Image (cartoon, rainbow, N blue to C red):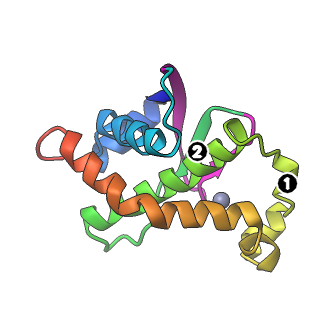
């Protein structure tokens, strides 16, 4: 199994602090979820870079990399901090699943055969893509458990 270590960029450290998100608890929650899906005896450390993408409309994972980009405001301004956190966690889980598709399942970027335009339009070609559906399903399936794991390991008050 992989033990995940998150390496947030400098800007991201501040952004996480603003949202009272504990990145240590995030990496433990990711490790536990991943271990349930791929239980293997061999332990390997895996470093993932997390970068906040200021002003972006969506979060991104570029296939073939170990880097996840999260848009800075995937929520409405009047949402509660708790809701904001859940939304950010959903984005993280979604992109984490794309990382799994690429780095564990060997899916190539070309298999997500939609364009940036399809994505921006949020059209059928994007929405019904097999791997996008899979990432959304993953996000839905694991968000509650992820939150529970996160809560167990977060530093108090976060
Ligand atoms: Zn996606």
Mark 2 CB in 8 Å range of ligand 1? no
Front residue of 142/60: it is 142
Query: SS at mark 1?
Result: helix
Query: SS at mark 2?
Result: strand
Residue 58: x, y in percent? Answer: 60, 60
Span of residues in magenta: 43-64
Residue 69, numbered circle? 2
Report the residue at 75% width, 65% height from top. 130
Report the residue at 59% width, 50% height from top. 97
Name the quadrant containing residue 81: bottom left
Residue 6: x, y in percent? Answer: 45, 30
Give neighbour class at mark 1: few <14, some 14-19, many 20+ (Cα, 10 Å): few
Residue 105: x, y in percent? Answer: 71, 42
Foreground: disc 1 or disc 2 = 1
Q: From the image, tell me which residue sits under label 1.
A: 111
**On screen, residue 84 above or below 154:** below
Report the residue at 54% width, 60% height from top. 138
**On screen, residue 139 above or below 26:** below
């Amino acid at each position: 199994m992989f033990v995940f270590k998150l390496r947030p960029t400098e800007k991201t450290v501040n952004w996480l602090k603003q949202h009272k998100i504990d990145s240590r608890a995030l990496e433990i929650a990711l490790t536990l979820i991943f271990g349930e899906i791929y239980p293997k005896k061999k332990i390997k450390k895996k470093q993932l870079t997390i970068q906040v993408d200021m002003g972006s409309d969506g979060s991104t994972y570029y296939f073939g990399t170990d880097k996840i980009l999260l848009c800075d405001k995937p929520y409405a301004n009047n949402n509660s901090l708790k809701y904001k956190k859940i939304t950010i966690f959903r984005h993280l889980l979604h992109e984490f699943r794309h990382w799994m598709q690429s780095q564990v399942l060997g899916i190539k970027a070309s298999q997500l055969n939609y364009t940036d335009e399809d994505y921006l339009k949020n059209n059928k070609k994007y929405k019904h893509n097999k791997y996008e559906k899979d990432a959304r399903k993953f996000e839905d399936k694991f968000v509650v458990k992820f939150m529970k794991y996160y809560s167990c390991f977060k530093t108090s008050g976060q």
